[in-house]
Image: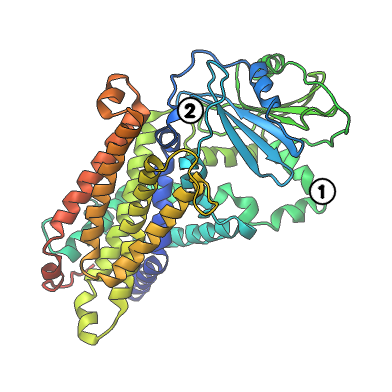
Amino acid sequence: MGESFRQSMTWLHSWAGVVIGALLFAIFWMGTLSVFDREIDRWMIPDTRLSTVAAPPSLDAVAAVAVGLVRPEHRAWLATLPTDREPVVKLFFQDSEDHFESRFLDPATMALLPEAGSWAASDFIFPFHYNLNLEWMHIGYWLVGILGMAMLVMLTSGVIIHHRIFTDFFTFRPGGKLPRSSLDLHNLTAVVGLPFHFVITLSGLIIFFSIHFPGVVPIVYQDKQADFVKEAYGVVQRDAAGVPGDLASLDAMRMRASELWSGGQPYFVRIWHPGDANSYVEMRRSFPDTVTMNLDAVYFDGPTGAILHTHTAKPVMTVQRFLSGLHFIQFEHWTLRWLYFVLGLSGCVMIAAGFIYWLESRRKRHAAQGLAGVRIVEGLAVGAVTGIVTATLAFFVANRLLPTGATVLGYERYALEIWIFYLVWLASFVHAWIRPGHAWREQGWTIAGLAALAVILNGVTTGDHLVRTLTEASWAVAGMDLALLAGASVAAFAAWRLRPRAAVSLSFKQPAE
């Protein structure tokens, strides 16, 4: 391979990383946290810290509660059933604009739990991963899609640049000068996580194919795009009659669906047009023991319980759902879940180390030439890396500090948590630009302090301190606290190691790649 081609790939890899690295780190960070989104939910919403029920709750009992909460503007309500990771019944009420309101039920007593008051991980961190919480005109999906394509380009160009891939795998000199050690760390984490990063990035693009390639479906289905939705996803629709009607036994419908699925159980049930003579019931099959997020569905007539439609995905959609399952890891496999988490963190480290190498390999030269590039990129890098981690921890601390029902200037408690996240994230960029050479260390200490504070506040505000959660085998809450303490330790160690940073950054020779 020609040296000029490799140099071109080096330029592409370096500058693409600098330009989009900030958002890529945010996506990787939020995606890594989303691996344990249900566990974070239980930490942030203490009322959901319930014991797992031995048997699934009665759907008729759930319906009895839901019917009392349905309002005229709701065109559907749905319930997701409890699992080991999420031991509550979640009720959602869907209006004509597809906005959702939610409430939680204790599956053992059918008692309504207090309103969550937080979007927690499932409604804030997880959506941030795939759309940056920018819903308007699908702009967030498009940005993440473009970044995903760029990530594939950087992975490919990185392999071309680092053609001594096995040497890079076994080379790490943490005691060397900062540029050398950061490049080694960037290479090591890139090589170790290369298959994972490639599959996760590619599958993320495939999941949202209908958004990224919106013209494909109209070409095939023309003006009958509803047929595509029915054939691909098994979605059935019919209009309301406008006449009151009853709802047949949901438990009987579940039993019939289980027979069709050879013992499989639904993970959610949705009632369309509740209280109407033309209501109908949608049940979707759970997939706890398979990678594929199957699309098996059964539709029932609401008043009679008669089967209206059954659906099983065709081969092409089965492949798409298999890749979706690889990406979202919703199946029950704790070893793989932890492996995903570790490899996700390796992606974060890869991006952060790439930033540090770019900065340290240019700092002296830019200073001599009077260029401001390093200072600008350093502020961007610090805000993107330590900044979003700091903001996330501020999000957790705010969750434990804000009282139930808190409102400020008309903003409810969940919105206040989100505002705190974004304001702290913005402040981290400002701090990085006004404190060059010190921001990495100072934000490292801030991360350590906030992580430790979150653990303390959890114990003080809920009584679920580590001794109690470990003794009672409350692994979701204990795991969250232990992860926070581990993060605090790593951040404190990194901040301590950065004490002589100014001297280090001015006394090195630029390593060859």
Residue 12: x and y in percent read 39, 70
Quadrant assignment for the C terminus? bottom left
In the displayed structure, does residue 341 sit left or right of residue 177? right
The answer to whether residue 92 of the structure is visible from this angle is yes
Above-or-below relation of 32 to 270:
below
Q: Quadrant of residue 66?
A: top right
Q: Quadrant of residue 294?
A: top right
In the displayed structure, does residue 284 sit left or right of residue 331? right
Q: Secondary structure at mark 1?
A: loop
Of mark 2 and mark 1, the one earlier in the sequence is: 2
- Quarter of the image for residue 80 reads top right
**Whole-percent x, y for residue 349 in the image:** 30, 53
Give the labeled residue for mark 1.
Answer: 224
* Residue 317, disc: none
Mark count: 2
Q: Distance from label 2 to label 1 (Cα)?
A: 38 Å
Q: Residue furthest bottom?
A: 369
Instruction: Write down the residue under mark 2.
Output: 86
Q: Quadrant of the N terminus?
A: bottom left
For the residue pair 68 and 175, the one nearer the viewer reads as 68
Residue plotted at (53% across, 24% down):
82
Depth check, front residue: 204 or 352: 352
